[in-house]
């Protein structure tokens, strides 16, 4: 990861003694890049609370202790966005993703207020995609009908597994029946939704993994996200590792997933993403194509482009610190300009996840640099048989996809 510098506690983000408008002016000064156009802009809204912290989760989430300050947090989100507006003046929002945590803990009225505030402050694309993450343990039919009426037009449901034993091992608050019921409610209220599942779970067999995938496919979801369980640092699973399938068993599961999803008409367009025709996740595609995103909420990250520089930001992570700092007018804890030397790696880290690759012109459009900046790395990747390129496309080969981390690391050296 590229390091992000802390913003001194007594200095608002951007410039010493400056507010958001002055910071925006500073970002517009001449710099080392030359972007001919700004990329599409998305909005990410982080909800930091959940019912129970899962042992594999390394996201910024905090267990609800009785209740959470819904109105105070909604106030802070609006204030955070108001302060960020000078950085994105004149740019419309193409997609919104409300993630967590468990955003479906929000009341129907709270979600309605959030979307109303966003519409008041931001210009939405006419065909905007608005996704909300949801936990099957929080599904209520009336509540989700209200979410749909408020403007949510896509759900991402954290199923993880339909197997009760594996759900318990993962620390999930729902069981298999609740998972199935959640998908039924989603089907009844949304014509676009995603099911999140994991494989290579503790003591999971190939037959059990196949049962999960078969069950998910039987619901004909427009989109599937199928993740290999990883034991992330600073999680309970990292401290107390469970017995998980070995590499050969995991590879068999991946082959099974590829066979079943392809047979059902799903395109594996990104490492973990499978979609029916016309149902790719536009918000996530913007990330992988190195588009821009403004993140508001506790611990949210932003990547914002200006004509001569690209800037990353991170909000304060702990909910109470975020509330306090936002009220004080400085929600940004860390901020840094991405250096020219790091931009090539950052772009390729994302774009190489796309099965179909990207147009060579996209690199210049999104980084403001010539493709020659990473010419040596492209040559090396091609020599190793991990990358294919011609005048129209640059994409990972089957070998490159299989050893994606090794391919991405080639671009780490400047």
Image: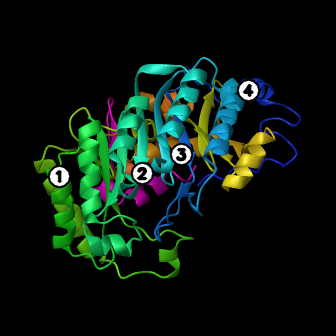
Q: Where is residue 102 in the image (x, y as percent from the top left)?
A: 48, 53
375 vs 227, left or right, is: right
The reply to whether dot 1 and dot 3 touch (C-beta < 8 Å) is: no
Q: Name the residue carrying label 2.
A: 380
Residue toward you, 260 or 166:
166
**Residue depth check, mark 2 versus mark 3: number of the one nearer the observer:** 3
Residue lying farthest to the front in this orientation:
142
Of mark 1 and mark 3, the one earlier in the sequence is 1
Q: Name the residue carrying label 1.
A: 217
Residue 376 shows up from this direction: no
- Say which mark, if any, is on residue 346: 3
**Residue depth check, mark 2 versus mark 1: number of the one nearer the observer:** 1
Residues under labels 4 and 2: Cα distance? 39 Å
> 10 Å neighbourhood of mark 4: few (<14), some, or many (≥20)?
many
Question: Where 42 falls versus 25 (above or below)?
Answer: below
Residues under labels 2 and 3: Cα distance? 18 Å
Q: Name the residue carrying label 4.
A: 24
Q: Where is residue 402 in the image (x, y as percent from the top left)?
A: 31, 59
259 vs 75, left or right, is: left
Q: Where is residue 190 in the image (x, y as percent from the top left)?
A: 29, 36
Question: Where 317 falls versus 177 (above or below)?
Answer: above
Which structural element holds mark 2?
Answer: helix
Residue positioned 50% across, 41% down in the render: 347
Residues under labels 4 and 3: Cα distance? 23 Å
Of mark 2 and mark 1, the one earlier in the sequence is 1
Which structural element holds mark 1?
Answer: helix
Of mark 4 and mark 2, the one earlier in the sequence is 4
Of mark 1 and mark 4, the one earlier in the sequence is 4
237 vs 309, left or right, is: left
């Amino acid at each position: 990861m590229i390091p992000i510098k802390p913003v001194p506690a007594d200095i608002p983000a951007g410039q010493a003694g400056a507010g958001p408008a002055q910071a925006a002016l500073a970002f517009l000064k001449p710099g080392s890049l030359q972007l001919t156009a700004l990329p599409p802009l998305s909005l990410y809204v982080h909800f930091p609370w959940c019912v129970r912290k899962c042992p594999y989760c390394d996201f910024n989430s905090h267990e609800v202790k009785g209740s959470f300050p819904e109105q105070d947090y909604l106030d802070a989100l609006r204030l955070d966005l108001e302060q960020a507006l000078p950085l994105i003046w004149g740019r419309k929002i193409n997609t919104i993703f409300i993630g967590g945590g468990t955003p479906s803990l929000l009341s129907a009225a709270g979600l309605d207020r959030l979307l109303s505030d966003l519409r008041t402050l931001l210009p939405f694309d006419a065909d905007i995609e608005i996704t909300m993450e949801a936990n099957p343990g929080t599904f209520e039919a009336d509540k989700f009908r209200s979410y749909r009426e408020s403007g949510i037009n896509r759900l991402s449901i954290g199923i993880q597994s339909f197997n009760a034993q594996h759900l318990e091992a993962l620390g999930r608050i729902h069981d298999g029946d609740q998972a199935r019921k959640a998908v039924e409610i989603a089907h009844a209220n949304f014509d676009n939704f995603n099911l999140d599942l994991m494989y290579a779970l503790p003591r999971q067999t190939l037959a059990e993994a196949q049962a999960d995938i078969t069950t998910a496919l039987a619901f004909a979801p427009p989109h599937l996200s199928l993740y290999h369980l990883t034991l992330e640092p600073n999680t309970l699973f990292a401290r107390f590792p469970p017995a998980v399938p070995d590499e050969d068993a995991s590879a068999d599961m991946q082959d099974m997933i590829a066979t079943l999803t392809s047979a059902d008409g799903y395109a594996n367009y990104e490492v973990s993403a499978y979609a029916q025709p016309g149902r790719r996740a536009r918000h996530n595609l913007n990330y992988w194509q190195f588009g821009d995103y403004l993140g508001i909420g506790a611990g949210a990250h932003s990547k914002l482009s200006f004509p001569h520089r690209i800037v990353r930001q991170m909000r304060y992570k702990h909910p109470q610190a975020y509330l306090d700092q936002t009220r004080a007018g400085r929600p940004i804890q860390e901020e840094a300009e991405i250096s020219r030397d790091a931009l090539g790696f950052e772009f390729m880290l994302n774009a190489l996840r796309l099965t179909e690759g990207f147009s060579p012109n996209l690199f210049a459009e999104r980084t403001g640099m010539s493709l020659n900046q990473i010419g040596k790395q492209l040559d090396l990747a091609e020599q190793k048989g991990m990358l294919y390129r011609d005048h129209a496309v640059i994409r990972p080969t089957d070998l490159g996809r299989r050893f994606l981390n090794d391919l991405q690391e080639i671009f780490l050296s400047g």
